[in-house]
Each structure stands twice: as structure tokens, then as C-alpha cells.
Amino acid sequence: MAIEIYRDAWGIPHLRAGGAAELAHAQGLVTARDRAWQLETERHRAEGTSASFLGASALARDGFARRARLDDTARRCFTDLERRDPETADWVRAYVAGVNAGLARGAEDAPEFRRTGLAPGTWQPWTPLGVWLATHILFAGFPAKLWREQVVAHLGADAVGLFAADGPGTSGSNGWLVSGERTVTGEAVIAGDPHRWIEDPGVYQQIHLSCPEFDVVGLAVPGVPGIAHFGHTGTVAWAITNAMADYQDLYRERLRRTGAGVEALGPDGVWHRASRHTEVVEVAGEEPVEIEVIETERGPVVIGGPEGIDGDPADLPASGSGGRAGPRCAGGPGEPASPSDSVDGGCAGGPADPAYPHGLSEPAYPDGPADPVAPPVAISLRYPPRVTGDLGFGALLPLLRARRVGDVDRAFDRWAEPVNVVQAADTEGGVLHRVAGWVPLRAEANRLRLVPAWEPGHEWHGRQETPRAGLTDGVAVMANQRGPTEPLGVEFAPPHRAERITALLAGKERWSAADMPAIHTDTHLASASALLDHLRSLDGLTPKAAALRDRLLAWDRRMDADSTDAAHYAAVRGALVRQLAAHPAFAALATPPLYPEVFQPWLALLPRVGFALEHLLRAEELYGVDRPSAVRAAIEEVAAQPPAGVWGDTHRLAPWRSLEPETPYDEPGLSGDHDCVLCTSGVPGLTDRAARGPAARYVWDLARRDDSRWVVPLGASGVPGSPHHRDQLPLWLAGDLVPVVTDWDRLKKETDV
């Protein structure tokens, strides 16, 4: 059977072939034609070569990719895949061959290639694994451990909980499963929306893959074969959210140079040879940059080296030491404008419960700096694929072939990275709610902070068993909150989104697929209560401020784009965040250490305060900060100069692009906020513009697959000017969804290949 490419009315590709390998070739081919620029930028990001055509702005991420050895890890994992699962390795090769066959034509249509002078390169068999790894390496948020070290060093261990992500800090994905007992059809419905960077082109690709073995619709990751995260085979459907597990460790290393290279002090008290080489990063318009790449027995050194940072050991803090550099909060995917991640991360916030999880408020940190006469300290990263040689690609073909929940369950037994919560349902009434991924068994201290590589007790001892959960009243809700993943994580999303979705689902006995957009687009902001409670207790305000206070207390707490009350609330919140961040109590945290630029967003104080605001306002004591006075100053400031319009005037979409268009788009205003179910996240106190939000929405109907729905923020095509580049944006804004079409007679045939 020849490869056939069809399109629906939205330009979504529907592919048909005689077998799985031919279908993978077709998927690579059509993705390269539709998204050549995206594929090539993702390949270069994984290889650490983006600066060669994007210039110095990409150098920080390139340096991290080189030092973390992302491309080398992808090669290792592919070699291991060839040994363990040759069928999947050949399937990945077929996808890569399709990409290489389609890149030249795709590049002809993409203006970015002409603007940068970039010529399409050649994908290697391991490139999809590199793309996957580069996309997810920061999902577990290991740089948050750097922030905790800073907080402990300057405020003490008890202060860490003030800024933990269990407050309104971590935006993430929503997902819910409604079993057949709670639907009008008697068959399950799965719905949700992954919250990620809104990118142009989008991070998810709507696609339909069909061959004699399987027929699957779903959301693919461009550059990776198959449908990993969200799929519907007709008889079974699945979806994921970030489990917020902690599975990456940071080690403080003692390194020294010798005549033969570099050595690292091990937990046995012996100096061991570390691997070392240099790499040259080409930078468009500037001189090349040489990077020293060092790897110890723990993992690659991602911060510092034998001479510390920039040759100055004092720049690299142990607990109790300081550093220097200005606060930052910017970046592209994986370089968050808000710390932590996320599928789903955002800026870190603070827990509703003042007791930090897993005893982090206990004296788990050393009292002072490392031995001052010891060799300078560097920081290495230990992450599972580097240790195991497995990225979990062995799950991808079994997912496509799945017919029942049990098949999905067995496929996710082979999942590795990132760690996710999975929900699935089938047409026979089966349901699944579990965690999947590779989490190491190791000491509790490893999860909480940087640990000394030269001390025993911080080794890995195999893989943790992943938890499972059930349904309550026929429903399961996942929104990155504490739940089945709690034993595997440290910081989780606040409960607001999960509690709101649960409450909405409880409001009706029977649900249909068509009902789900009302939940997707709910804008109630439960986390506003902390600030409103403080406003309620204020007296002696000026008349304008008193009127504003009364207005906000009467507000319905909905962050709708056309709401003037939402705009006023956000303005007061932003003013309060700036007041608190400027307080002398937190002054030491305003100057983070001179870590590489890619880690600086996790260390920026203003976003940390912004997303921790709920807990900072409710903590029993806040280091002498007079919170009523700060709230008073904030509302007086806004009352004197109130916002002129509605929430959507400032809360506007801000998609990330590796190369900005020559003619900027007039991006629309948005409803929602970071703690709403409609999670569109700016950075309180810094900007209302939303770089994060629903990167797709889906509704999987198990009664009839063609009653399923989906939408992406922009469109199916990555080519500016294409009729399908931004044609789904109006629906995405309105909360509407595109029909899933699987009837080939309703599709337009594009070509035979």
C-alpha cells in the first residue's frame, strides 16, 4: 500500500500506509513539510548548535546542552534501543528518513530559513530522542534546588516553605476522566489541556495515523514519532499530566586539575578521573566560544568547574555563602519566564500548608559553607536517561497498538521520561489512573537540595515503584496537585484547579463530550482569597482606595478578559508583589549567584514572591514584614492610578518564537490566570502577558471517536502565511473545539508518496 496523505478542513494531516514503518516515514515527511523550521530549531537545540544561526541569544542554552551532554545521551539511548528493541529502533529510523526526505521542500516554504541563511541539515537516527530529551530535561525542575540553597543560606531552612510550589506557583496541565456511570452515553470521556509554553509553531501536532495494525488520532510532539501523550485508538484513549516527581539530582563536586586532566573526589574519599574534553560553539556574528565539558561518576558538570564559576570559586555558593548577579526572568521553552516546570511548570510559589513537605523545614542542610581550604566546588547533574540509557521510547509503538486499558498500562510500564500521571479508559468500561516514569531510589536529602558528592549515602539504588490510584464517584481529576505522586515529589501545584474541576464535575450527574469546554474555560480564581481577606480588614483608607476595596470585595473572582474588576485585582496584586519583593527582609535573595543564564529564572525573587503570594500573606509570621501596611500601600497606589481598561488589555497572548516575525502579530487578550482552570499565566508583579497556557485542548469520547474534539492555540501549519497557521486561534480563544474526523471520505487527499 502506498503512503497516502489526507487533510481535513483545518489542514490537520491524516496519514495512511501499509505498515507501521511506512507510516512512521509518512509522519516524518509530513511533519518536515509542515514544520521544517520548528524541526530544525529543535534539532539544533538538542545538539547545542542554535547560536550558529540565532546568535548570542541562544548561547546559554547551547552551553547547557553541551555541558549536560544531551546529544551524547540521545546517542547512548538509541544504541541501547537498538539492542533491546530493534523493531522500535527501525521504526524511529523510518521516521527520521521521512524527516530527511521532507526537509528541503519544507524549508522552501519557511521564510525563517532565508532570513537566517540556515540550510536544512541531516537528522540522525537518535535525533528524535535528542529532541525529546531537550524538551523535557527541565521538566522536573531540578534548578529549584539551587533556589532552596539560596533561601536556606540567607533566611534559614524554615523559610523554604514560604516559596515552595505548593502555592499558586506551578502552572501545569489539567486532566479529568469521567467514567461511563457519569456520562450520558454510558461510555467514558477523558478531557483536559496541557499547560506549556505557547509556541509558534505549537508544541503539539494534531495528527491521524492509520495502517492495518492500528488507527490512532492524537497530539504528537513534532520531531518524535507516534503519539505519546494524548491519543485515541477508537477502543481506548489516554492522556497525561506532569506528575511533579523529583527524579534528577544535583551534586556539589570537588574537582582538581592534574597533569592528566580533571579528578573528582568520590564518596570513598578517593580522587577519581573525570572525563573531560572541550567543544567549540559557533555563534553567528561573533567569535566561537569554547566550552569545557566535564563528567564525573555522578553525571555531567553543569555549573562551575575546577576553578568554580568564571575562575572565581567565591561565585559558587555552598550553603551559607553568597553570590552575585542580577535577577532574571526570561527565556524560551525550558528557560522559563517563571521558575520550575514545567509540562508543565511555572514560577514557584508557596504552600497552603506552612509545613514544608518531607521535613524540608528540618535541619537537612549543613550549617555553613564547605571547608574553605577544599578544592573549589562545581555542580553535577544526575538524570535517569544518562544513567540507564533509556528514554522510554519502547512505550511508543505499544501505545499505538493498544486496544484496551491493559495494553496502555503495559505500555506505560516501559515509560521513562518525563514522569507523568496517566489516565485511560476503554469501550469495555476499563479505566486507569497511575503514575509512569523512572524515579530513582535514593536518600531523601537528594530530593531536597544539593548533596555533597564526596560523602557516602547519596548514591542511586534502582528504580522506585510508581503509584496507582482509583476514581471517586466515577471521576478522577489530575492537575499537578498532591495525589498519587506525593511519595515521589517535593513540590506540587496548589489544589485550586483540581478542587475547582472536581466541584464542577460534581455539579451534574451526567456529562457528555460536548459539555467539557465549559470546564476547560472556567475562570474562577480561588487563590484571590488571601489578598481579599487582607483588604477586608483594612480601615482608614482614602476614599478612592476604600471604594476600590469595596469593589474588589464584591467581585465575582472571575478573571474574564472583559472584566474591569479582574484588571483592578491584578493591578493591586502586582503592586503588592513589588512591595514585598522590595522589603529588606528579602534583600539577600534579590542578587542570585552567578550561575549560568539558563538557571537564573529559577532564582529570580520577584516571580518567586508573585507566585508565593497566597502563602506569604497567610504565613503566621513573615520575617518582620508588615503585611497590612504593604497591602494598604498597594491598594492606595492602584486607587491613585487605576488601570484604564479590562483584564484582556494587559493579559495578552505572548507566544515564544525562536525568531520573531518581520511583521509582529497583534496578539489577543486572554481570560484566565495561573490558578484558574483556564490557566493562562503571566508573572504577577512583572508582566500580565501570558507566555504559558493551554498548548492544546482535547476531549476523548469513548462512545464514538468522531464525537471527540480538539484544538491548538494557533494552527496545524508552522509556515507563516499558511491558511492553517493561525486558523484555530479564534476557536481556542472562545473555548471552542475542532471536530475529530476519521472518516476518510470526509478528508481531502493531498498526494500519494
Image (spheres, grey):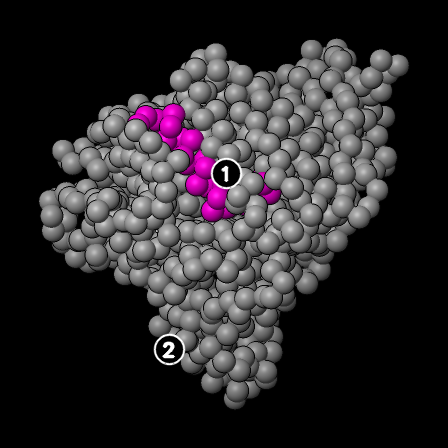
Which dot marks residue 102? Answer: 1
Classify 143 as above or below 566. Answer: above
Separation of marks 2 and 1 at Cα, in angstroms: 57 Å
Asked whether 222 or 244 is in front, the reply is 222
Asked whether 471 or 197 is in front, the reply is 197
Q: Residues within 10 Å of mark 2 (few under 14, many from 20)?
A: few
Residue 415, image x, y percentages? 41, 26
Residue at image position (48%, 15%) is 82
Q: Can I make out residue 8 in this image?
A: yes
Residue at image position (22%, 29%) is 403
Quadrant occupied by the N terminus = top left
Q: Main secondary structure of the magenta part?
A: helix
Residue 436, image x, y percentages? 38, 29
Residue at image position (82%, 17%) is 261
In magenta stretch: residue 37:
yes
**Mark 2, mark 1: which one is toward the viewer?**
1
Q: Which residues are magenta?
A: 18-42
User: Residue 443 sits in which quadrant?
Assistant: top right
Please, what secondary structure does the residue beneath circle 2 have? helix
In magenta stretch: residue 155:
no
Classify 40 as above or below 468. Answer: below
Is 405 situated left or right of 722 in this image?
Answer: left
Which dot marks residue 554? Answer: 2
Asked whether 316 or 705 is in front, the reply is 705
Residue 631, image x, y percentages? 56, 71
Q: Can I make out residue 534 in this image?
A: no
Q: Amino acid at mark 1?
A: Gly
Please, what secondary structure does the residue beneath circle 1 have? helix
